[in-house]
Image (tube, rainbow, N blue to C red):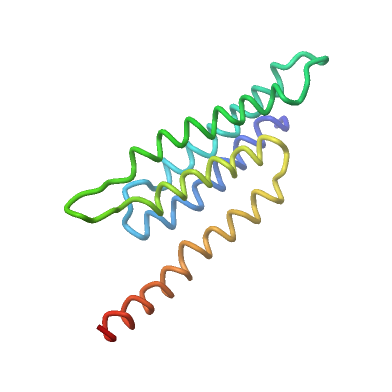
Amino acid sequence: MTLVYMRILIALGLGIALGAERTFAHKTAGMRTYGLVSMGACLFVMLSQIALPANASISNVMYIAAAVVTGIGFLCGGVIIFQNHHLSGLTTAAGLWLTAGIGMAVGFGQVPLATFVTVVTLVVFTILWFIEQVISKLSKRSR
C-alpha cells in the first residue's frame, strides 16, 4: 500500500479513536464524524502537496491548510448550541477542530505527533471529564 493511502487510513483510525470515546460519552458526533474530519483534513493536505508543481513554494501548501482550518471552524460552529441560557457542544466542537489538526499532521507525514495528540486528547476527554464531575459536585455542595 502506498504511503498516501496509508496516511489516509492512519488519519481515519486516529479520528475513529477519538470518536469512539465521544460515542461512549453519548455525544452525537461520534466515530464516523471524527473519522471523516480527520481523514478529510489529511486528504486536503496531501492533495495540496501532490498538486503543487515542483517549483512552487511551501506557502501554497499552507493556504490549503488554512482553508481546512476555516472550513472546520464553520462545521464546529454548527455543533455549538445555545438554548434556554445553556451552552452545549463546545467540547465536541473543540474535539472536531483538534481532529482536523490531527488529520493535517498525518497528511504532512507527522504520524508520531498525530498519535501523541490523539492519546493526549483521549486523556482530556476521559480523565478530565471525571475531574470536572468531582469539581462540579464539590462546588454544588459549597453553595
Q: Is residue 82 left or right of residue 113?
A: left
Residue at screen point 37% across, 59% down: 24
Q: Is residue 46 left or right of residue 21?
A: right
Residue at screen point 40% across, 35% down: 75
Residue 107, position in %: x, y? Answer: 66, 35
**Furthest residue in direction right, as rendered:** 55
Residue at screen point 67% across, 36% down: 6
Check the image and report above or below for 34 versus 1. Answer: below
Q: Is residue 12 left or right of residue 138?
A: right
Residue 143, position in %: x, y? Answer: 25, 83
**Depth order, front residue of 95/15:** 95
**Depth order, front residue of 95/112:** 95
Check the image and report above or below for 39 versus 119. Answer: above
**Depth order, front residue of 51/70:** 70
Residue at screen point 72% across, 43% down: 110
Residue 117, position in %: x, y? Answer: 62, 54
Q: Quadrant of the N terminus?
A: top right
Check the image and report above or below for 68 versus 16. Answer: above
**Furthest residue in direction left, as rendered:** 84
**Furthest residue in direction bottom, as rendered:** 142
Check the image and report above or below for 123 versus 19. Answer: below
Residue 23, position in %: x, y? Answer: 37, 54
Give the number of callouts. 0
